[in-house]
Image (cartoon, grey):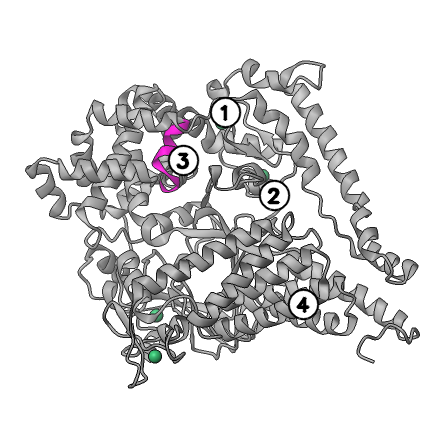
Amino acid sequence: MESQWRRFCADRWRRLGSRERRQLEQGLGVGDTLSVCVGELRSEDMAVLAQLSAQYSTQKDPRVELDFKQRGNALFKQKDYIQAVASYSKECLVDIERAQAHNYPHELLHKILARRTACLQHLGQADGASDLGSREKLGVTAVPRIQTKPTDRGAPCRQTKTSRILCNISPSIAVRSDSSRGRHFIATEELRPGQVLLQEEAFAAVLVPEGTRRELFPNEDVYCHHCLEQTELPVPCLTCSFSSYCSELCQECAWNQYHWLECSLGGLLLALGTFSQLALRTVLLAGLQQVEKAEKLESGAGQWPSGECSVRMNPDHRVELSSCSRTSGAGDEMPRDSQSRYQMIHSLLTHTKWQTPEHRFLCGLTTAAVCQEIRRMGLESQLVSEWLELDAVSVQGQGLRILGVALLRHLLQLGCNAQAITTFRDTGVGHSHVTEMEEVRIATAFYSTVSLLNHSCEPNTSITFHNTTITVRASQHIPAGQEVLHCYGPHLSRMAVRARQRALRLQYFFHCQCTACVREEGTVGMDSVLGQFLCSHCGMELQDSEEAHYTCPTSSCGLIISKQALFQQVKEVKGQIGVARHLSTQHPDEALRLLCECQQLAHTLLSNRHPLQGEIEDCLAQVYASQGNWLAAAQHLRKSKDLVQIRYGAQSVELGKELFKLAQILFNGHVVDEALTVTVQAENLLSLHCGAEHEMVIELREMKSCLRTLASQFAVSPNFNHKE
Ligand SMILES: [Zn+2]
Ligand SMILES: [Zn+2]
Ligand SMILES: [Zn+2]
Ligand SMILES: [Zn+2]
């Protein structure tokens, strides 16, 4: 929920009448909660929301269209390893850098030009004009397609596009259910690291906009709003300026399935936040008929397996707090068709009992506002007539009610069941010859089967995404009979045991008893590794205490330092590293000066295992790389790599990313032997976590074959081998 709306609702909750407040505090069901909130929604609330929505204008702006051309050009990668081999051998390593800088990948250029032509033609046709250049007119002249009836909803376009599988479960794992863990997956035979266990397409996914947080290529301009495919030349929605797609096909599918309504609501959904949009899209994708059916089953009219039912109907059942389960489902077979997939989503726990009344009010008021806006805009009859296929007049009001209840249910579920879709993205900082990957969230999604995986702070799986498809792989050997676990967020290497358990309790309402938590409980856990502060008097590592300060263990010293003061200093160092990163290309000397200061401060403040030491080394490597000083860059990056290994472990994806970077720097620095070794290490590690077809792994393979060619060529050149 966007922060302004959330703040408004929090204030609204405080001003709520005592009767309504009491009602909500009693822990009403979804339907009754909605009734209370609908009764509470005032025209003043809608006025405030209208104001907030206006900040997210989705009106067409002609200037936006102009950008698309420039963007197409900027997305080239200035790298081509096959060309690099040619240059290496031609110029005998004399001027490789200059040669690389001029090697634009011609194949890519050709592809993009072809796509641009196709796109212009498409836009020309849509406009009905022969002038292909006048694309700006589109926004004004396009007739809003709200009038058109959604086409055959029985054939979702994503299936026609490619024969994608909605959900694919390895025969080596199986669903089990017991009272302490709920429904969960176990290995039915020994699983090997890297083995694919589960692949599932999101039931619904919504792109998370970055807005002004990223000036160049924010998510919303780079990824298709329907299928999340990365796109150089997006096809914009004909009506709004916000949504754009990878293809005409996606644009049409999105429009027919859900965007016809989302588009009319415009800034409202952006003001209410991604969860509201995802909840609404889930309902629209399922269709009201489907929703109504699931709702009837829920209220007892239909049949559920009795065991599952009692857990779901009785939130006091100890299973909820004592296990990591966040689901309950219907039936023993994994649903593969969209109908039963929706039923599974619908039956996910709402945790109504554990959520604060204030949170339930926020979700309820949000739902009431969406319904109110749909009614105000006169979209209700369309919603009802097209989906219930009944006499529109007789079911008006009823349709909106069904929509509202489902919407609120999904909003309540999302806190525990939303899955972030992440991708590794080029950070765009630093040198164009080194791709630095950062993991970013690009969307939020509902997965019905993946939701069955229980949490561990020390999971035995890794997840990756391709567009909206999630892939779960074993990240280690998993013996037969052991549970398959993934991490909901609080990971062993990033948070101390107390912080993890607190986060899991607040968001998922359970007390984590995973192997890592059991092992670390009663100890300070990661604090002893992450903390790592030094006494500024005697240099000893400070000891953690429950209080607001650290104490020096040296008896003759006994220094006491406030945690807040130390954290403030760490924050300042972090800030300075950030500034240095931005200066690295344009003002390397200034960046180096800043980093030197950071190093000095870190030296007196932090132990040499502290992650911040690694960040400084990493940044130094970046500055040297941006100057083409590959050997100096490699020297710093090796240190950073060692620290990443200490922190995340020798089998971690984080180490894989660091090795990927080191491999590129060594490659550019012509350190062929070491580059080859590191490339192979990185390839092994990353393909284990991300699969052999991941973009980083493909790049590493290309580098490897290039380096092998070089190694064989230079075997006859005695001058080259730097180690001799
Ligand atoms: Zn698409
Ligand atoms: Zn639109
Ligand atoms: Zn845990
Ligand atoms: Zn001391």
Does mark 1 have its CB less than 8 Å from ligand 2? yes
Label 4 or label 1, whichever lies nearer to me, is: 4
**What SS does tag 4 mark?**
helix
Q: Earlier in the sequence, mark 2 or mark 4?
A: 2
**Gap between marks 1 and 2, in whole Å?**
20 Å
Does mark 2 have its CB less than 8 Å from ligand 1? no
The type of residue carrying mark 2 is: Gln
Q: Residue at x 12, y 36 (%)?
A: 16
The type of residue carrying mark 3 is: Leu
**What SS does tag 3 mark?**
helix
Residue 504, magenta (yes or no): no
Report which residue position mark 3 lands on: 284
Query: On screen, 545 above or below 234?
Result: below
The type of residue carrying mark 4 is: Ala
Report which residue position mark 1 lands on: 240
Report which residue position mark 4 lands on: 634
Report which residue position mark 2 lands on: 230
The type of residue carrying mark 1 is: Cys
The dot on residue 587 is none
Q: Earlier in the sequence, mark 4 or mark 1?
A: 1
- Quadrant assignment for the N terminus: top left
Residue range corresponding to the magenta coloring: 266-275
Q: Earlier in the sequence, mark 2 or mark 3?
A: 2
Q: Residues within 10 Å of mark 1 (few under 14, many from 20)?
A: some
**What SS does tag 2 mark?**
loop
Q: Is residue 195 visible?
A: no
